[in-house]
Structure formats: C-alpha cells, structure tokens
Image: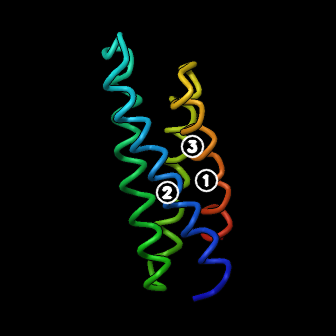
Amino acid sequence: MQQEHRECIDMCYACAAACDHCAASCLNEQDIDMMRACIRLDTQCAAMCRLAAQFMALDSDYLSQACRLCVDLCKACAEECARHEHQHCQACAQACNACADACLKMAA
C-alpha cells in the first residue's frame, strides 16, 4: 500500500471516530431537536469515511469516486458541526475538514 493511501486511510478512520463520538454526544445534549441534522450527517460521514478507507486498502478502481463523495460528506458535516459550540462538534468539524483535504488529494 502506498504511503499516500496510508495517511488518507488514517485520516478517514480518525474522522469516522470523531463523527461517531459527536453523534453519541449530541444524543446527550439538552435540545436534541437542534442536533438532528448534526447526528444524521455524523452517521453518514462516518460510514463514508470507512468505505473510502476500505476502497483505498483494496486499491479499488472506484477509489477516486469514493474519495470525492467522502470529500462532499466531510465538508457538509464540518459545516453543520461548526454551527454548534459544543466541544465534540468543534472537534468533529476539524476532523472532517482534515479528512476532506486528504481525500481531495486522493480523488485527483
């Protein structure tokens, strides 16, 4: 596996973990209705990050497309999380932005 893949795979798994943590933490917030979009994007982003990492490990012919979709979901999740001042949301937004940057290079 190329080193470039290894770094992006690591970023994808770190982002997935941050999204899982954010979604779980959002469920414990006072105003859960306000957190619905965040939770939904967190779960979708985590799933896509894991899939993109798997495609990189497999050196899939569809790696570029998977990474492009991962970029889109990471950016959407980061934007939603950044709207909330909770620490878990801010940390998730940072992880999503870093993953989007890494996957953008892989999608090129």
Residue at position x 33%, y 24% in the image: 36
* Left or right: 84 in relation to 52: right
Whichever of labels 3 and 1 marks the residue nearer the N terminus, that label is 3
- Disc 3 and disc 1: Cα gap in Å? 6 Å
**Relative horizontal placement of residue 35, taking residue 105 as reference (left or right):** left
Could you tell me residue 17's position as x and y percent? 45, 51
Q: Which residue is mark 3?
A: 75
Q: Amino acid at mark 1?
A: Ala
At horizontal 58% and vertical 61% (from top left) the residue drawn is: 11
User: Secondary structure under badge 3?
Assistant: helix
Q: Find out whether the residues at labels 1 and 2 contact each other: C-beta distance under 8 Å.
A: yes
Q: Residues within 10 Å of mark 3 (few under 14, many from 20)?
A: many
State the residue at coordinates (51%, 29%). 80
Instruction: Name the amino acid type tagged 2.
Output: Cys
Q: Quadrant of the C terminus?
A: bottom right
Residue 82 location, x and y as percent?
A: 59, 27
Q: Residue 56's spot in the image, x, y percent?
A: 50, 77
Q: Secondary structure at mark 1?
A: helix
Which residue, given by chain and number where applicable, does mark 1 sit on?
A: 100
Total tally of numbered discs in the picture: 3
For badge 3, the amino acid type reads: Lys
Q: CA distance from mark 2 to mark 3?
A: 8 Å
| Badge 3 vs badge 1, beta-carbon distance below 8 Å | yes
